[in-house]
Each structure stands twice: as structure tokens, then as C-alpha cells.
Image: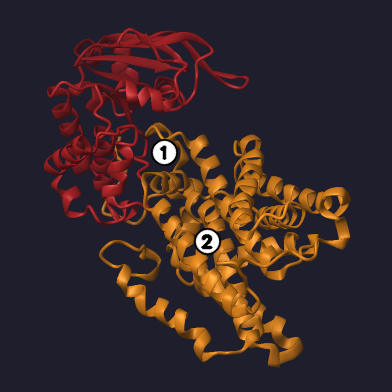
Amino acid sequence: MPLYDFVPRRDNWYVWLPVLAALLLFPLLVRSEYILSIAVYAGIYIILTSSLNITNGYTGLFSFGHAAFYGIGAYTAAILATRLGLSFWLTLPLAGVVAGIFGAAIALPTLRLTGIFLALVTIGFQEITFLVTLNWIGLTRGPMGIPAIPPPAIGGVALSGNLGYYYLILALDVIVLGLLSRIVTSRVGRAFVAIREDELAAQSAGIPTFRMKILSFVIATFFAGIAGAFFAHHARFVSADSFRLDETFAILTMLIVGGMGSLVGPVLGAVLLVVLPEASRFLAEYRGVVYGLILIGVILFRPEGLAGVPGIIQARGALSRVDKPSGAGEPVG
Amino acid sequence: MLELRGVSTRYGPVQVLWEVSLTVGEGELVCLLGGNASGKSTTMKTILGLVHPVRGEVLFRGRPIHRDTPAQVVRAGIAPVLESRRIFPQLTVYENLLMGAYTRTDGPGIRQDIEAVYERFPVLRERRGQLGGTLSGGEQQMLAIARALLARPRLLVMDEPSMGLSPLYVEKTFEVIQDLNRQGIAILLVEQNANMALAIAQRGYVLQTGRIVLADTAQNLVNHPMMRKAYLEL
């Protein structure tokens, strides 16, 4: 079975047991705080990339504002934790809900737009969010950022080193990926793909396409908010600079390199592009060159990404209706 | 069963349909003929709720449906077979069929109906795990028809089912259409291939630049001088 086709099912989930076991044992073998912190960041980006995959990969909507929702989640958690003293276990779901509400609010008026227009609106939202965060000093403390966010506590004990964060993000990733795989293999997930493949056909089959697109957007932004809350409680400091357009592009790049429309693709992309720049630190200034070469290589030689659905880019829009080479003969009549 | 009364449809400033009226009776096979840009596809989209008419009404089993969403139209009992098939290439054959049953919630009934379309189209059973896009054009047409049947329609609205198919599959498609009609499903067949359509239909309408210009039995239409000259190329 090709990697892009993998979804955990009752009959095949155990193939990931060795992977999970390796991930559980990993910190016992590698005791370096530095390496663990990289692993934690990879875990955060796995959530961000996998959630963006719901809109951009499965449903075929071009959203370019994912970092804004990530930031909204992070700020929600930061504000709730520092001002109201809420614990991580409350700020985490609330950050997701707030980001999801913003997602719905931006999706409702704009999802009648398609393709490049939706992309432009989401880029605009991204910039507006940044400017509001920077200037609404009463709420966000503006350029000063919000410091002293308390760490998550498990059983009354606050996490201190990256070891605890590592296991926490591992658990969170397993839960998020589990939920996302349930979604994409459900009736709703099939409707998302049907909309990507042929919106008119989906609509005439009775799929409420507009509502489904909003749902897709809300799911993606909810999980971006979840990632934001974890980030806030891990970095313990948030500032607007962490959630700019370049962050959106970083997530998007991970998704494209990893591959859209599959569950495995975004995970590979996130891990590769978090680890790679760190692993190539010895190259000093040439790091960027290596990064760029890898991107160019993937786009040239594997346009669907490492584990994306083959043909997903070509399958978009009108081209999906062009017949594939087939046994059909000449047109008649 | 289906009745269009004085339906006018426009896309922005461009009016495409002018006072179109037609009926399809219970269990009837009616064809809608016309050349390019005559308004055939727009008539179909209006029936399916993909566009709403600016004037006139569409009645299905006595109930107005011209303000309904496509989902409501499907639930009412009208299923589409769209032009150039438009199956979902990245979904499997089985998943494509499930999308046809999207508006239904009766799990056992859906499984039973999928089994029934597998009986009718054994090639779909063989390829149920394959991606829709890997099927040949003719097989995709069978899948498109099967997908529509999964909605358990009383009326099938088919847009140019013969387009782009090999002669063999054109024949097969028309056989399937006749067969479905014999089983009691009413069919509105939108076609450019007037010869084939009139051979199986009971009645027909001819659209020209958005107006119905002829309405008669299939037999009379075949012999109509205007038809012979304009469409049948005899």
C-alpha cells in the first residue's frame, strides 16, 4: 500500500506500534535538551501542517492565513492563562474554539470566493491580525508581548524540562492525528474530497458544499488554535512576530514538501523541515541554499510531495474533468 | 411528475431560457434536443436547483422546487447524470457510489442498493476499490449512472450521456437508459444526438436559443421536416 493511502484502521493500526515505541523511547536515548526542543517544535508543526491539509489538501481551498489562527490560539491561551489564571487544560480547548470561531467568521463571507481570491483574502486577514495584535496594547501588550505564561501542570506538578513537553506533544499529536483520520475517512471527509475534485458534481449530488467548506475551514483553524495554545505554554512568551506571513509560508512549504491530501504527508513534511535546518547548522550561511535546493528538487521531481496523493495538483478544478487516457474511443454524435 | 411552467433563467445580464415549459409524466422517457448553446444544460441546471429561474416555476409531483437547494431536489427524488460524467477521479468506485447516496441516511438500504448496481454493472464490482479516474470513459459513464441511481430517484435527468463515448458504449448507455425506464424511472434525456435519443424516447422537445420551438411525440419529431433538415441530417 502506498504511503499516501495510509489511514489507521482497525486492521492496520498496529503497524505504527514500532514507530510509537521508538518515539516513546527516543528521549531515554537522547538526553539532550536541545534535541528534545527540536522534537517538540516538530510536534507543534505536525499539528499545524496536518490541520492546514484539511482545507488546502482535502477540500482544495487555498488558505494562506494559517499562522494567523495559530497566533489567535496562542494569544487566547496566553491571555486566559496570565489574566484569568486558567490552566493549560482549559486554555488548550478554548484556544481551539476561539481560533475556530475566527475561522468561521472569515470563512462565511469569503468562501463564496475561490482559488486566488480566497488566497488573497486570507493573506489580508493574516496581515490584519498581525497589525491588530501589534497595536491593541490593552489586550495583547503590543510589541512587548505576553511573558510569564505558566507551564502546563500534570497532577499538580508543573512541567519544567523539555522531556515533559516532549511526551505531552506526542500525546497531543496522536490524539489530533487520530481525530483527523476519523474525519477524513468519514462521510464528511469524502464530501471534502468530492468538493475538491468537482464542486458542481458534489453540489448536484446533494452535498451542501458551502456548509462543508466552512466546516473544513473551522476544523483546520480549530487545530491551528490548539497548536497555538501548546506553543504559548511551551515558549511561555508570545509576541506578534511569531505569527507573521512567513510563518504561514513555512507551514505551507511543509505541507507541499510532505504532500497534500494524505495523512502521512504533512507529518513527514513537518518533521523534515523542522529537523533539516537544525541538522544543517554546520553549513552556517549555506543552510538556506540547502533548504532551497530541497524545495526546488521536490517541486521538480515530486510535485505531489513526499507522500501526497499523486495528481492532486492536476486534479484541481476544470482539469479534473479532462478524461484521463482511457479505453474510450472517438467522440460520437 | 415534472413540470416546467414558463421558466426563464438568466446568468447576470444574459438571459438563457425564455418561458420554457415542458412536462415529464410518471415513468415517461422524454428527450430534450437542441444544438450548442440552445439552453439544454441550463434547463437541466434549473431543474436541479443549481441555478434559480427569474420567472416561472418548476413543479415536481405537484410541489414547487425552483427555490430548493440541490440537496433538497435530490431528496425530492430527482438525480442528475451530469455532462461529461464528472465522477470524482480521486475517490474509489465504491466511494463515488456512496457520494450518490449522500442525502440518504439508511445504511442497510444504501448497502442493498450498492449491491443492486453491482449486479447491473458487474464491471463496477470488479473495480470497486479502484480510483474513479482510472476507469475508461465508458466505465465512468456507467459509474455516473450508478451514482445517480444510489439516490433512489423517481426521475433521472441526464445531460448528454453519449458525449465522448465510443460507439459501443453509446449503444450500451442507451440500452441502460431504456432498461431503467422500463423499470419505472422517469427520464429526461438532454441530448445532441437526436437520432439515438428519438429512437428510445416517447416524446421530445426541441430547444433553440433558449425557447421551445417544437414539442411532439418522438415518432412525429423524427418525421418533422424541420427536424429532418436541422438535426437528423437526412
Of marks 1 and 2, which one's residue comes earlier in the chain? 2
Give the quadrant of residue B6: top left
- Front-most of residues B97 and A188: A188
Task: Give the residue at the far bottom of this rendering.
Answer: A282
Give the percent coordinates (x, y) of residue A75. 73, 55
Q: Residue at x 49, y 60 (%)?
A: A176
Chain displayed in orange: A
Mark 2, secondary structure of its residue: helix
Distance, label 1 to label 2, CA atoms, is 24 Å
Give the quadrant of residue A130: bottom right
Is B81 positioned to the left or the right of B45 in the image? left
Chain displayed in red: B
Question: Which residue has dot 1 on it?
Answer: A202
Question: Is residue B158 something one can see in this rendering?
Answer: no
Residue B172 to residue A234: above or below: above
Is B161 positioned to the left or the right of B36 in the image? left
Give the percent coordinates (x, y) of residue A26. 49, 85
Label 1: how many Cα within 10 Å (few below 14, some 14–19, many 20+): many
- The chain to which mark 1 is attached is A
Give the percent coordinates (x, y) of residue A229. 65, 59
Discs 1, 2 touching: Cβ within 8 Å: no
Question: Which residue has dot 2 on it?
Answer: A50
Q: Residue type at mark 1: give it.
A: Ala
Q: Residue at x 44, y 56 (%)?
A: A179
Give the quadrant of residue A324: bottom left
